[in-house]
Image (cartoon, rainbow, N blue to C red):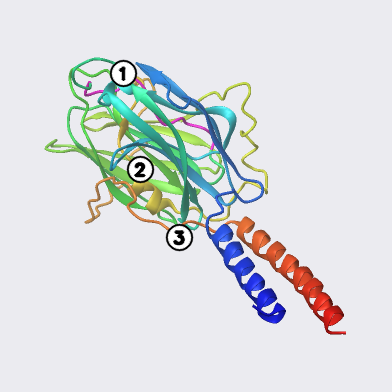
Amino acid sequence: MSRKHLWRFVLILTVVALLVIAANTGVLAQGEIVNVTSPGEGESVTGIITISGAVDFTDFQKYELFLKNEDQMLWAATAYAPVINGNLARLDTKTFPDGAYQLIIRQVRTDSNYTEFVGPTFYIENNLGAPVPYPEVESSLLYTPVAGALVRIRNCSGDRLEFNYNSPEGFCSGDDLWISFKHADSSTCPYVDLLLKPCEYRGTARGQGAPKGATYGFLAEAGKIYELTYSGGDQIYIAEVEGDARAETDTGGLDPNDPARLQSTVATEDAAEDEAIAVADKAPVPTEVPARAVPSSETSTQSESMLPVSGQGAGSNMTFIVVAGGLILLLIGGGILASRKRHYSA
């Protein structure tokens, strides 16, 4: 092979190698961090555990935790605030069959695109024969959201709950949800978390088959957390809460009014539909005054909560860095080869 064809072959081979490296680069973009510190790889767990680690990334909307068992992706928790060196979720492992599970963290951005981090594989070993039907804890932690207002709706009644919400203001959130009923043998209440645009909201809550429902209204303010508890009939209670306490080591709890964190838009309808139904720590005792009555609002849409089934990962800057660096090396290498060619020709 002549020297002319040799250096061309080297350049082509280098380009192909760089493209392969760029396509398989799994490094997070600058300023993003995702890791799991507990449970560890290959660890066996029982009972109620805390999943700890870090999840922080650009254009943050929320993160979702899943347990992957063979071809199944089982929802575990959702949170609307970054965590760095803290607690990501609680998990009652007794509600899952014994076996091996791989932890998957889905990073959902404000444009609804997402990427997924593959975490450790751990083993659930409760030796119960069959999983228990009702978790003893809420899996999703209520941290102050980086955008919008966070609302947890609990159904503590014995009827399947139809819950709708909308706003008299324009360009706000609205939907119609179904939340499963509280079983008589359970001390926990099924719940759904919503991320709402800051607005005034009104709606109705009615147990399936119940002759009478409840009307409510409240003002959702950015960076605040609310709990709406339906106890049956025309009783619904609304309270602003501080949310869950963060671990002392957690440095992800930034000021929600920080311009670097506060987002101008919130994808609320997708968040409401995507949220899985979990359960609360215990059935709340209605100690708050009932919400003020407002005219009921009827909607025709009835949507079950569900998990997202598709998505597009947001690109990483690392790919461009690798390619740019490779092109620079190509130019340098090509110049050296050309210089040698001229030297030998002379």
Q: CA distance from mark 2 to mark 3?
A: 21 Å
Which element type, helix, strand or loop, lies under badge 1? loop
In this view, the residue in front, 158 or 69, is 69
Q: CA distance from mark 3 to mark 1?
A: 48 Å
Q: Earlier in the sequence, mark 2 or mark 3?
A: 3
Question: Within the magenta stretch, is there residue 141?
Answer: yes
Question: Within the magenta stretch, is there residue 100?
Answer: no
- Residue 143 picture location, percent across and down: 52, 32
Q: CA distance from mark 1 to mark 2?
A: 27 Å
The residue sitting at 29% across, 26% down in the picture is 99
Q: Is residue 183 left or right of residue 173?
A: left
- Give the residue pinned by disc 3: 171
Q: Earlier in the sequence, mark 3 or mark 1?
A: 1
Of badges 3 and 1, the one in the foreground is 1
Figure check: 76 above or below 131 = below
Of badges 1 and 2, the one in the foreground is 1
Please, what is the three-letter code of the amino acid marked with disc 3?
A: Phe
Disc assigned to residue 275:
2
Image quarter in which the N terminus is found: bottom right
Image quarter in which the C terminus is found: bottom right
Q: Residues within 10 Å of mark 2 (few under 14, many from 20)?
A: many
The residue sitting at 54% across, 23% down in the picture is 245
Q: Main secondary structure of the magenta part?
A: loop
Q: Earlier in the sequence, mark 1 or mark 2?
A: 1
In this view, the residue in front, 213 or 272, is 272
Per the rendered image, the range of residues in magenta is 132-144
Which element type, helix, strand or loop, lies under badge 3? loop
Please, what is the three-letter code of the amino acid marked with disc 1?
A: Glu
Figure check: 276 above or below 282 = below
Q: Residues within 10 Å of mark 3 (few under 14, many from 20)?
A: few
In this view, the residue in front, 295 or 126, is 126
- Give the residue pinned by disc 1: 125
